[in-house]
Amino acid sequence: MTSTARRLLQRQVFPLDRDTDVFPLYVDPDPAILDADKYEVGGTHAAKELNRAALRQSISSGDGIHPEQILSRTALRMAAGEKLSFGTYFNAFPASYWRRWTIVDAVTLDVLVRGAGTAVTVYKSMANGRSQRVDSVTVTGSEAESVRFELTLKPFVDGGWYWYDVVAGEDGAVVEQAEWSAEVPEERAAHGTVDICITTMNRPDFCAELLGQLGDDEQLAPYLDEVLVMEQGTDKVSGSAVFPAAEKALAGKLRVIEQANLGGSGGYARGQFESLRKGTATYAMMMDDDVVCEPEGIIRAVTFGDLCKRPTLVGGHMFSLYARSRLHSFGEIIQPYRFWWMSPSYAVNDWDFGARNLRSARWLHQRTDVDFNGWFMCLIPRSVIAEIGLSLPLFIKWDDSEYGLRAKAAGYPTVTFPGAAVWHVPWSDKNDALDWQAYFHQRNRFVAALLHSTYPKGGRMILESFNHQLSHLVSMQYSTVELRHMALEDVFAGPEQLHADLPIKLGAVREYVKPFSDAQLKVEREAFPPVRRHKPPKRGKDEFEVPGRRAQLMAAALAPLRQFRKPRELAGEFPEAEITAMDARWYRLARYDSAVVSMPDGTSAALYRRDPDRYRDLLRRTVAMHNRLRQEWPALAERYRAHLAEMTSPDAWAATFGLTDTEADDGADG
């Protein structure tokens, strides 16, 4: 008989900073008001849209716990008769993930409670969100009493959670702690260790504060093998006033490696490289420098990874740094025909747990299986890195998603694990589809598709790229079109150039777009001429209404033809309109011959001007380039796949890092 040992899987936690914005992620005073089942809603488009709109409506009562109720990291005080649910993002137990991916088949919940007459009730949910009462215990004495529940994981094949609710007795209650544990084989009882790999560039205070969060958590310390900071900027993390305290808190486990700016992929590849050759940590975790971390999530990711049936990449979720109860995405896949990252069709992005709790949303109870996890927080087993290699040399964009697909092809899944998370600046506040990052989006997406697409010629990718080019052309975003052309030219150049381009391409891209008016961002509105139009809007019509589907299709047909016409009078000297970032859609921009357009981050604006001659030239090149893609796709795919192992090898990366053979072998720190 195999000997076993009891291992802690998850413990009850509360935010030590007592930030009320995040309380809904830890404890919930509201009841569960379950939304409609999708089969009740039906299959019509109107019914689905109406249901999605209803899902966005807040059902929160506005009640909440007081910060003073949090007594410690694990303890919470409750008033007499108060009822609270711990069926929340950080304190519910994601049973279906443990059931699907790990060797654990049963768990034990121990809750330590003080307060005579206090009731602890355990619930479970099904994959469709319906909850079921499992068991309940009432504390009889006034002293702290431990109540135990033995719980099977068998019913969770498709989804579902466990959680517990507490109703305080007439004298109030203190929930001292709660722990989920399991019997595991003795060789799995000891936890693994992790190298945290952080790439940073000119965010010294943000990065130093993150290091402090990692160093200040006593529970996390035994799990940390080393914290590796890849310093790629000129405003260095070591110069932050916060850095000395963070360095001291990490007690010799911090190593800062200075190198040229090789982007996120170059920074993370260096972390993977160092972790691999050091060989002492079980995992390497990729983590952004501009996040706020929940250290407990790192412990949970390591614990989950330790008990997975096979080596598994374990990712965390991303919450908004500015609206801290809002979840960006519950998991992401690569839609194979489009080869584009997205959430599964049933998921709702930008989900606000402060408006509708976990127990009230059916879709959150279905287990979400993913293709990859963003490297804002992603745990990778060292054994996987040793087998499939390091990151592709892509600078930024698609390095994390390509790695997930590569690992999946080698038999190593990725799990985006509930209860592991960071807070990050949301993607919606960035301008990465239009600025210099557009080059990396386009090039790297095609590189990843050439490596991994299962469809001939990438499925819909070439057509979709062509359509995107048209939308940018009719929107007067000529710099973006040129960058995307440059990206495709570099795809044709082949995989041999990726490492060589890594340290120089960003500078080349930024220099290339400088002459373009739509790429010249101005902070002050006075930097642009005033708005003047030759004719006012027809019949005084509101130009910022959202057009219907039919109107958009008509615009798609007519807008490309309109671009051949001569611009209206005054448009060359004065903008015809000021357009906010939220209204800067192609079908709106296509109406104008010039406009001042603000950027999504709200800090600047640019002047767009229509140029028929440039439009003709760019359209001709767009057609030719996408025809070439169709013709050369099979040969390009074969070429990229043949070079994948070489591109991602430690030796290739060592050369890019500028390490000599001796340095690459002896563990020098750059």
Image: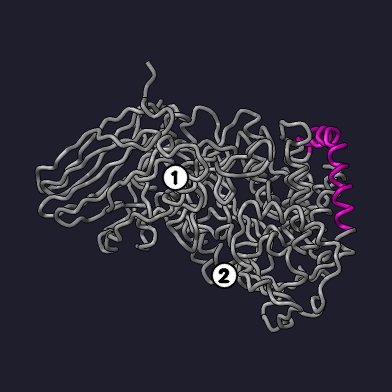
Q: Residue furthest top?
A: 1
Report x, y in % for residue 309. Answer: 50, 27
Q: Residue at x 56, y 55 (%)?
A: 254
Report x, y in % for residue 311. Answer: 55, 31
Q: Residue at x 73, y 53 (%)?
A: 556
Q: Say if mark 1 contacts mark 2, CB within 8 Å.
A: no
Q: Say what amino acid the circle numbered 1 marks.
A: Ile
Report x, y in % for residue 278. Answer: 62, 42
Helix, strand or loop at mark 1: helix
- Applied colour scheme: one colour
Task: Answer whether residue 52 is visible to the viewer in this image.
Answer: yes
Task: Answer whether residue 11 is visible to the viewer in this image.
Answer: no
Helix, strand or loop at mark 2: loop
**The magenta stretch spans residue 632:** yes
Relative to 289, is 169 on the left or the right?
A: left
What's drawn in magenta, residue-wise? 617-646
Quick check: 537 above or below 644? Answer: below
Relative to 600, is 215 on the left or the right?
A: left
User: Which of the numbered marks, if any, corresponds to residue 299?
Assistant: 1
**Residue indicated by mark 2:** 240
Q: Residue at x 66, y 61 (%)?
A: 585
Please tell me whether the stretch drawn in magenta is mainly helix, strand or loop.
helix
Q: Nearer the viewer, residue 665 or 304?
A: 304
Report x, y in % for residue 7. Answer: 37, 34
Disc nearer the start of the sequence (1/2): 2
Relative to 368, is 428 on the left or the right?
A: right
User: For the residue carrying disc 1, how many other residues have a C-alpha within 10 Å: few (<14), some (14-19), or many (20+)?
Assistant: many
Q: Nearer the viewer, residue 86 or 150?
A: 86
Question: Can you tell which quarter of the image residue 526 is in?
Answer: bottom right
Give the position of the C terminus as an image quadrant. Answer: bottom right
